[in-house]
């Protein structure tokens, strides 16, 4: 399977304004991330708030500028691509935003909202009534929803409308930012099943941005774990869940609600809050919270180490995995 999207050493840098108590400068919200999204596959990006996962997704969608590195989509470099050229790709790369109701204009009907991409792209030959019926049916909503307004539908229905709008122009890559946030568990399952069905039918590649590990395990083929703007672990989803190679991944898994009451969980607690990206720790940036920290961790930056099922940034995975296994 070939890579539809290739991200290489991407930095997203923001400029700070100086004030009375602060000086001007820059921060790297995304710091040297590399990953591939394959055609027809789902890649999940996981991390706490402030980890940089949404910023990375917005850089892929052209909503943030990548300061350094390369983002290649179907062989075309997106970094520094003129807006007129990027506009042509917006038929193929679409982003579905986190807030289902807030992202829909309350003054427009559902028909107007889901067919708006045709008007934006100047596709005047389309029968918008027929397109609205097609798109609503595709996401499991009745055609009569076309005449409703966003305030007249539920959060789950609004999420389906967002999917319909995103898929109007038959894209190749869907970027879904927290696609199940704020939904009941049963509705979350319906949404994930919808995305999986549409992926099979349309051959979509999907990049999911989430903090919900149950979502990741349910739908993704591959997962990347981000911390302070960096990828600290990546691998096939089931391998990462069963054999994590970074203590941050282990801590996220340990904090995740386990549906199996008989499962033996590896209990690991994170220490303190994530440090500010304005004052990144030296060495391994996770060492200030790591329960398995060694002296070297505060001095040396861990290399990106590949292994049979993925890659990680940790000096001593063999040490802490033995400790966890012994304690389990």
Image (tube, grey):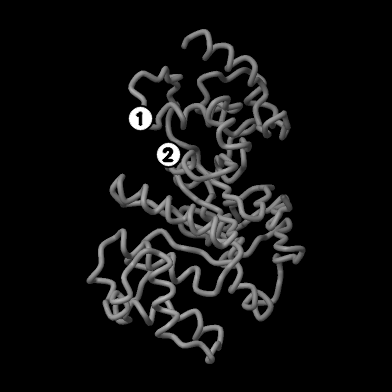
Name the residue at 56% across, 71% down: 170
In the displayed structure image, the side of residue 1 where residue 261 appears, left or right: left
Which sits in the foreground, 316 or 184?
Answer: 184
Query: For residue 121, what is the image quadrant?
Result: bottom right
Query: For residue 213, what is the image quadrant?
Result: top left
Whether label 2 touches label 1, CB < 8 Å: yes
Q: Earlier in the sequence, mark 2 or mark 1?
A: 2
Number of the label disc, if any, that sits on residue 233 = none
Number of the label disc, if any, that sits on residue 259 = 1
Identity of the residue furthest to the top in this view: 326
In the displayed structure image, the side of residue 292 where residue 38 appears, left or right: right
> Residue 81: x percent and y percent?
71, 72
Mark 2 residue crowding within 10 angstroms, few (<14) / some (14–19) / many (20+): some
Can you say whether 310 is above or below 41 in the image?
A: above
> Residue 62: x percent and y percent?
60, 67
> Residue 218: x percent and y percent?
46, 41
Number of the label disc, if any, that sits on residue 214 = 2
- Total marks in image: 2
Name the residue at 46% across, 57% down: 20
Identity of the residue furthest to the bottom in this view: 124
Distance in Å between CA atoms under marks 2 and 1: 9 Å
In the displayed structure image, the side of residue 76 where residue 270 appears, left or right: left
Local SS, label 1:
loop
């Amino acid at each position: 399977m070939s890579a539809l999207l290739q991200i290489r050493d991407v930095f997203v840098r923001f400029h700070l304004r100086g004030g009375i108590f602060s000086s001007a400068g820059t921060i790297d919200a995304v710091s040297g991330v590399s990953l591939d999204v394959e055609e027809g596959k789902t890649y999940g990006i996981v991390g706490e708030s402030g980890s940089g996962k949404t910023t990375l997704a917005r850089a892929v969608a052209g909503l943030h500028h990548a300061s350094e590195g390369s983002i290649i989509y179907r062989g075309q470099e997106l970094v520094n691509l003129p807006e007129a050229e990027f506009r042509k790709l917006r038929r193929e790369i679409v982003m579905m935003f986190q807030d289902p109701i807030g992202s829909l204009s309350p003054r427009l009907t559902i028909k107007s909202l889901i067919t708006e991409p045709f008007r934006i792209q100047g596709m005047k030959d389309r029968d918008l009534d027929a397109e609205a019926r097609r798109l609503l049916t595709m996401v499991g909503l009745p055609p009569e929803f076309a005449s409703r307004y966003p305030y007249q539908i539920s959060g789950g229905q609004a999420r389906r409308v967002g999917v319909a709008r995103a898929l109007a122009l038959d894209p190749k890559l869907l970027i879904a930012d927290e696609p199940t946030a704020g939904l009941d568990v049963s509705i979350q399952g319906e949404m994930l099943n919808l995305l999986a069905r549409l992926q099979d039918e349309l051959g979509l590649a999907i990049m999911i941005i989430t903090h919900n590990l149950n979502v990741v395990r349910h739908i993704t083929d591959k997962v990347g774990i981000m911390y302070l703007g960096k990828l600290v672990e990546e691998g096939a989803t089931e391998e990462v869940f069963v054999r994590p190679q970074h203590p941050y991944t282990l801590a996220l898994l340990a904090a995740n609600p386990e549906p199996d009451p008989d499962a033996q969980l590896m209990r690991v607690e994170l220490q303190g809050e994530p440090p500010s990206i304005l004052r990144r720790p030296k060495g391994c940036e996770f060492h200030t919270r790591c329960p398995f920290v060694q002296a070297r961790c505060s001095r040396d930056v861990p290399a990106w180490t590949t292994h049979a099922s993925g890659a990680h940034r940790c000096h001593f995975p063999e040490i802490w995995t033995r400790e966890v296994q012994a304690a389990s």
